[in-house]
Amino acid sequence: MKIKLLIATADEVYAKLLSDNISEHHSDTLDVSVCCTLERLNETEATKNYEVALLDTKFSEHINTDRIHLPILLWSENETSTEQSGTFEKINKYQRISSVVATILERYAKISAVKSNTELRQANISAVWSPAGGVGKTSVAIAYALSYSSKDSISKEKEVFYLNLENFSSIPGYFTENGRSISSVFEMLESTEGNVEMFIQGISSHDKNITFLSSPDNYDDMCILSNENVKELVSSCAKLADELIIDLSCACDIRVKEIFEMANKIFIVTDKTSTAGIKLTQFMTQNNVFELIKDKVTIVANKDAVIDEPKCGSVISLPYLQAVDTCALCTSLSEYFSKELDLV
């Protein structure tokens, strides 16, 4: 769904900078029109309706708000608010354009109804899970994300979304967190109002060519997610990328089982410790879930682990790499992933 955005400001330099950047980087989401004179504004208003308008103080006094779903005032500290502009939501004019776009999407998502769009992508969904902790599951998940984000397809990198659903998030150890917490998405899911996909797109962070949602505000936020919440969250993220990689906690509860069912591929990670081997064997032989998913399971034998009798179709063997820097470790592992999955 494209949002019709009007930029109405007498500052022609700023208007061009903003519209050019949006047209170059966000044309799939925002359809931009620009007015730098009141005459042009009057002509535009007579013929078009807009979902969002960014207005400076001068233009806000003349805008017909009946034709604008969400008017937002372009604001700076040295400006004086008028009676009309004082009723609008405000956005700081002098900040990174990416932050301006994120704010537009976030605010519009909260007030817009969910609209079906058959043109939205549906990502391939890969779940990364392990019955044992400490086997390097998150490093494997991010290594896979890195290998996929650099996959060349007609000279275009694949867009990858990494969704961390661990009970205790590992994201701070791997990414620079500079976006809103995933907890704000949980709030929207519980309210059942607004456009979840657009909201996620607005608050997502980007690092190493990977899109992700920052850690929850606290542990309880992740625990209260219902099964239906999880399904909607996964479905929404899958519409925003080519590959969705979900990093799961080690439990095998109803939420994990639901994601197993939704996933196209499942990577089960183990290492060469006896504990990991025992738990993997128990899952394969004592849990009926494995029989339901084994056709899409790949065992990832991490840290030089050896799988003697694999009970699924394929095994990926990864070496035991040591690195203090987790980012460097994942980058090195991604090269092995690329070779194993023929992504090079």
Image (cartoon, helix red, strand yellow):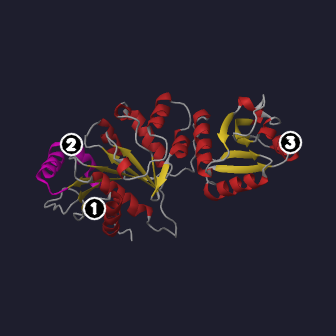
Q: Amino acid at mark 1?
A: Ala
The answer to whether marks 3 and 1 mark residues whose Cβ atoms lie closer than 8 Å is: no
Tell me the CA gap for discs 1 and 2.
37 Å
Magenta stretch encompasses residue 343:
no
The label number, if any, that marks residue 323 in the structure image:
1
Which numbered disc, 3 or 1, marks the residue closer to the eye? 1
In the rendered image of this protein, does residue 72 appear above or below residue 207? above
Q: Position of residue 178 (x, y in %)?
A: 48, 47
Separation of marks 3 and 2 at Cα, in angstroms: 66 Å
For disc 2, the neighbor class at 10 Å (few under 14, some 14 to 19, many from 20) is: few
Using the image, determine if residue 200 lies above or below residue 342: above
Q: Nearer the viewer, residue 130 or 13?
A: 13
Residue 96, image x, y percentages: 61, 51
**Residue drawn 44% across and 36% down?**
183
Instruction: Classify mark 1: residues with Cα within 10 Å, few (<14), some (14-19) or many (20+).
Output: few
The residue range painted magenta reads 271-296
Question: Which mark sits nearer the N-terminus, 1 or 2?
Answer: 2
Residue matched to label 2: 288
Name which quarter of the figure residue 80 lies in: top right
Mark 3: amino acid = Asn
Q: Horizontal placement of 121 versus 173: left or right?
A: right
Residue annotated with mark 3: 42
Of the numbered discs 3 and 2, the one sitting upstream in the chain is 3
Q: Is residue 282 highlighted in magenta? A: yes
What's the residue at 22%, 47% (across, down)? Answer: 133
